[in-house]
Amino acid sequence: MADRISKQTTIQEEVSLEGVGLHTGKEVKLTFKPAPENTGYVFVRADLEGKPQVEADVSYVVNTKRGTNLDKNGVSIQTSEHVLAACVGLEIDNLYIELNSSEPPIMDGSSKYFVEALEKAGTVEQDADRDEYVVTEIICYRDENGSEIIAMPADEYQVTTMVDFGTKVLGTQNASIDHLSEFKTEIANSRTFSFLHEIETLLEHGLIKGGDLNNAIVYVDKEISEETLKKLRVAFNRDEISVKPNGILDNLTLHYPNEAARHKLLDVLGDVALVGTRIRGKIIATKPGHHVNTEFAKKLAKVIKAEKRNNVPKIDLSQPPLMDVNDIMDTLPHRSPFLLVDKIYELTDTHVIGMKNVTMNEPFFVGHFPGKPVMPGVLQVEAMAQTGGILALKSVPDPENYLTFFMKIDNVRFKRQVVPGDTLIFKLELLAPIRRGICQMQGYAFVNGQLATEAILMAQIVKSK
């Protein structure tokens, strides 16, 4: 994870914009709202009972036809990428994106209007540090159609897209940004595009109800018949439509000769946002599209998760600890045989690292498989919780006057057995700032450099005297 610490951000106030969904044709209102630390990007369906939320998470991608579409428990969000690209491009970390329909407004087919709205709302720094995934080796995804996306080490989040549609009207194009600060001026206003043959198919299937010729560049890649022109005039409510010399319909003027490649870069940023963490590295996308983008995002998310889980704390067990067992007993009320943490090596406002030597003399081995002694999983979780208790009690000035009580345990997984002679290393990190005595932590227990146990723990700090 990052060695350059910066703070998370959200927006200062709510801001709304209205338009039509490209595929639904429905009038829709989108409202950006400030969100707490560690929220990420969350879509909220204000038109449905209970205002269900759909996190911008690649695991919710259900299809990528004409956009990146998410679905969580039957609640859908269509065409998420242009909104998410604006959020990433302005380096905003936490946002609620509230909609009264399944699809954000298409606006002009770019991210420009979302950027303007977010800038109007202003950004505010939050207390929590940003989490950033640093790419240290090449991560690659390619499909059978010759599309390929690679992430490689770099000092900044950089993106290059290379497109080749094999048509005369739209040949090979490239676009790049070396820093996210370039997004607003170089990429945000690049509009979506289509080929005439795709438009004809979409019209036949009634799939571009909200499309008018102000929100898509249409490349004419075939002879255009009078019958097709007639259909287009009706569909787009225009008296006249013709083809410009550069092979696009005459509804609009290109912002850049390589606007298609720039829009593909915008899509890559929006789709890779579904990984859920900031990235420091360079992405090179050859012939990208929503399917390959999201498959790459799934692979990257898996790599990040595995690295995070196997991110074994590097501590020197030969060095004096920050707290020995006597210091721990001054803080925690637990005593033998139920004190399950021996030493604390690191303790900050947001994380703690502790250790337990598992010996054959543990009282639980007497009855827990005497012929094949294994440390009970529940006691591993208890040991993790006691280590987390040290972190929780750091938030009060007189920890000896407080107790921590379990409220909830989630996502517990046991990965390997813990046996006599093992040294357990515990790492617990706050998932959110401690508020009203409630402490939520992600806990890991490692043995011999490998993950043994993980869980999300919630505890409450309560005054005992």
Image (cartoon, rainbow, N blue to C red):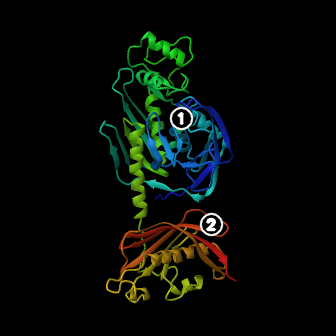
The circle drawn on residue 60 is: none
Q: Amino acid at mark 2?
A: Ile
- Judge whether 234 appears above or below 450 on screen: above
Q: From the image, state whether disc 2 or disc 1 is nearer to you.
A: 2
**Which residue does the image show at 64% across and 82% down from the upper left?**
400
Query: What kind of element bears circle 1?
Result: loop
Nearest to N terminus: mark 2 or mark 1? 1
Q: Nearer the viewer, residue 277 or 379?
A: 379
Percent position (x, y) of residue 424?
Answer: 41, 77
Does residue 327 appear left or right of residue 453 in this picture?
right
Position of residue 25 in the picture relative to residue 3 (left or right)? right
Image location of residue 192, percent across then percent down: 49, 30
Q: Residue at x 46, y 76 (%)?
A: 378
* Category of crowding for the residue at label 1, using alpha-carbon neighbours closer than 10 angstroms: few (below 14), some (14–19), many (at least 20): many
Q: Please state, as top left, top right, bottom left or bottom right, where the C terminus lies in the image.
A: bottom right
Residue under label 2, please give it.
434
Does residue 400 sit above or below 250 in this rendering?
below
The vertical placement of 376 against 201, above or below, is below
Q: On the image, numbered disc 1 is attached to which residue?
A: 188
Measuring from the top left, give residue 375's x and y in whole percent: 40, 80
